[in-house]
Amino acid sequence: MASSVDHILRVGVTGGIGSGKSLVCAFFSRLGVPVLSADGIAKELMRNDASLRRALRALLGSGTYRPDGEVDRHYVAGKIFSDSALQRRVNALVHPRVKARVEKQFVKLGRAGEKIGIIEAALIYEAGFEKRLDCVVVVDAPETQRIQRVVNRDKTTPEAVRRRMRAQLPAGLKVRKADYVIRNSGSIGDLKTSVRFLHTILQHIAEEK
């Protein structure tokens, strides 16, 4: 459970690949809730943190970064999604830095008077990040639907998506661990209704914090 010193309700939003967690976070953002992106923070750190850049290049090879200085995400994914031990070593480099940055951002939001803050992160449970949060929302959908969404979005193959899924906790386990679950197997309207309903609940909790 997170500290309540700054009186902001820290909410994690996670889910398996293709579940729709980014869309859920977009709806929360439209309702006025500040949303932080663990993936965005990780990208920024991997681009601008010199010590992290050196460590990643030493671990993954010279192809980690493109000539323009950006991370070559396809190269990195090809490395870590086929080698779980290597993925753990990369995560051990990146996750602590992301957690520290997220904590600073939550404190900043709380001091600015925000009552609720959301961190969107694919690996909340895998990284042990839930210990720093007040509650975790898991977005879930049937596996076949999730695979098809990612195939359409990333122009990839079902097997490539399954390989990425195997690098995450099973969706069913995330659902069992969750404080709240949003099912995203219906229409966009259904999803918006679910988000609005949960937003009302979170507002009540934040008022009591």
Image: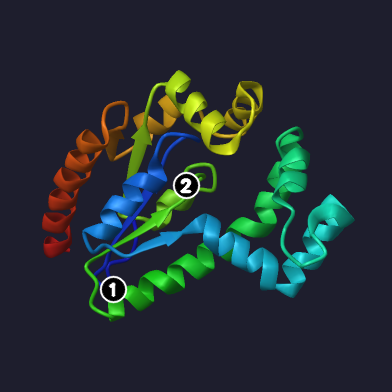
Position of 165 with respect to 68 (left or right) is left
* Residue in the picture at 30% in, 54% down: 134
* Residue in the picture at 28% in, 51% down: 27
Q: CB atoms at circles 2 and 1 under 8 Å apart?
A: no
Q: In this view, does 64 lie above or below 51?
A: above
* Residue in the picture at 47% in, 52% down: 129
* Residue in the picture at 23% in, 64% down: 32
Residue 202 circle label: none
Position of 159 with respect to 207 (left or right) is right
Image coords of residue 169 (percent x, y):
52, 32
Residue count near mark 1 (Cα–Cα under 10 Å), binned few <14, some 14–19, many ≥20: few
Residue at the disc numbered 1: 5
**Between discs 2 and 1, the one toward the N terminus:** 1
Image coords of residue 202 (percent x, y):
18, 53
Position of 55 with respect to 199 (left or right) is right
Q: Is residue 208 above or below residue 192?
A: below
| Alpha carbons under labels 2 and 1: distance apart | 22 Å
Report the number of discs.
2
In which quadrant will I find the N terminus? bottom left
Mark whose residue sits in front, 2 or 1: 2
Q: Residue flagged by tag 1: what amino acid is it?
A: Val
Q: Residue flagged by tag 2: what amino acid is it?
A: Ile
Residue 124 circle label: 2
